[in-house]
Amino acid sequence: MNWVTGSAFVYISAVKILVVFTLLMITIAFWTLVERRGAAFIQNRLGPNRVGPGGLLQPVADGLKNFFKEETLPPFADRALFVLAPMMAFIPAFLTFSVIPFASPLPTPWGLVGMQVADLPIGFLFILAITSLGVYGFVLAGWSANNKYALLGGLRGSAQLVSYEIAMGLSAVAVLVFAGDITLNGIIARQQASVWYVLPLFLAFFLFLVAAFAETNRLPFDLPEAESELVAGYHTEYSAMKFSMFYLAEYSNMITASALLVCLFFGGWDIPFTNWDNTPPWTVWKSLATFAAFSAKTLFFLLFYVWVRWTLPRFRFDQLMDLGWKVLLPTALGYVIFTAVATWALEVPGRAFGVREGLILAGANVVLGYFFFRVLDRNRVLGGPANRGRKVWRTSETTRRL
Amino acid sequence: MPISVKTVSRPTSESSYVRAALKGMALTFKHLLQPKWTMQYPEEKESATWSISSRYRGTHRMAVDENGKAKCVACGLCPQVCPANCIKLIPGEDEQGNRYPLVYEIDEFRCVFCGYCQEVCPEEAIHVGVHYENAEYDREGFVYDLQRLMAQPHEMSTLWDPSDPKGE
């Protein structure tokens, strides 16, 4: 069967945009509930369970509340940017999901339909480019509100996003090098043909995971919001739907990051231990089954986000920067070189990487991971400047001098 | 570093972030599966681990004798002892010379629920009650008259017993 072309492609793409957007919105809505109930369960409470069966309609109640709340526009704010900022956060957050493939191709009377909104040849680069745009939303929100806490939040947000962007991109470069492909479909196909990349590229997975937490401003890296320090960070002055847009953007980013982790390291929509799902002829059942597999994996990472959020306390800002620049960045750089060398050494002309190469690299990753975690585990990496064995300027010395 | 931080040097096993993080993840996961403490209030008012204390001092109740009349003899001790001055008592006397309250009103909004009225009452007539759901639609509803105080169905507080301070 051929891929859809012509005017059918346009219509089907429009339908796909609609469906994916709606699905994302619904997932986000229910994820706010899962977040709150997960938090409650971890704290031995029950959480919101009053609206609808088991609290299922709580997101609807929250949404209604936000629609009817007053839109505040502080007189001291920069009006244009204040209104623009939530959109700047919202649009890139939803745009990134468009390149993520979420099921095997679906056969229709008009031809084969790829189950992703846009199959871009630059795939992963698009995601990197668009997620970076999200930082403008935070910075503009923080600056235009003309509130010192919001500004601090925005500044922290920009510093954090810019720092972790690099680590995130570099750790993904290892995947791109090993797969020899930059489209997400290509990466998934390679994983289906060999092993999931979490095995041969475990360290890249770990770096990407940490960077993804930082990129989505989730605890332990939620310094831009830091409600105990900065009121509500960059969205302090926002209310009603403008605030909701930041909220939606945050959760959308979370979903995209989870989906991306799944695509890059967990085989995307691949069902493990079978080739049934990734060989033609394509059927509707295959699409449904692979979509279920993809959703299950993504939901696992979303749950992981919630779990981590209610476990780990927030990093201090200097610890955050240390981790980004002194741990993740050099490790990711070194890992790119390691993967490049390994890929070059393992390469056999005319033959793609299979299970054998994957397992060899997995073994190498066990060794590398051991050293990485050993160094990371020493208190000197995350213990702050005073723990680093370097003599710092102490008050006792100055007081003695005085 | 302009600010110096006092650091306590600890062994790696205690100061390791990775190990602590994993330990924390395990702990929160354990809590995820544990039974929940929440009591679903309007439906559940008691649980296996909690019930309201018999010493609770809530809205008042007037004890009633076997003839269905208030035990109060209008001695005037409770308005006298009341620190919030919330009891209004106008005494009356019948043909046999028995005193009884013509008007007995307690403004529950002024009341501080100290329980002195119950402690001071020689006839064990006025009591504070083991009761906490007192919502009304207007302020007048909080001035309880004698009829209402007599009609309250809830339990009477046992107050604090000095000979049994822990309530055993």
Image (cartoon, coloured by chain):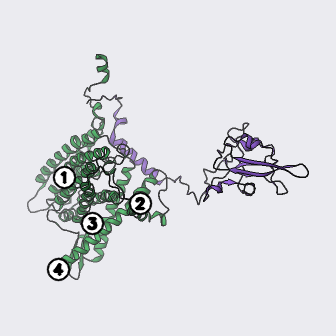
Chain colours: A green, B purple
Q: Which residue is mark 1?
A: A169
Q: Which residue is mark 3?
A: A269
What amino acid does circle 4 point to?
A: Ser
Distance in Å between CA atoms under marks 1 and 3: 22 Å
Q: Nearer the viewer, residue A183 or A198?
A: A183
Residue A114 showing in the rendered view: yes
Q: Nearer the viewer, residue A123 or B29?
A: A123
State the residue lying farthest toward the top: A401
Q: Chain of mark 1?
A: A
Q: Nearer the viewer, residue B19 or A391?
A: A391
Residue sitting at x 31%, y 40%: A316
- Percent x, y for residue A38? 42, 55
* Of the two numbered discs 2 and 1 in the rendering, the one whose residue sits closer to the viewer: 2
Distance in Å between CA atoms under marks 2 and 4: 40 Å
Label 3–label 2 contact, CB within 8 A: no
Q: Which residue is mark 2?
A: A33
What amino acid does circle 1 point to?
A: Gly
Distance in Å between CA atoms under marks 3 and 4: 28 Å
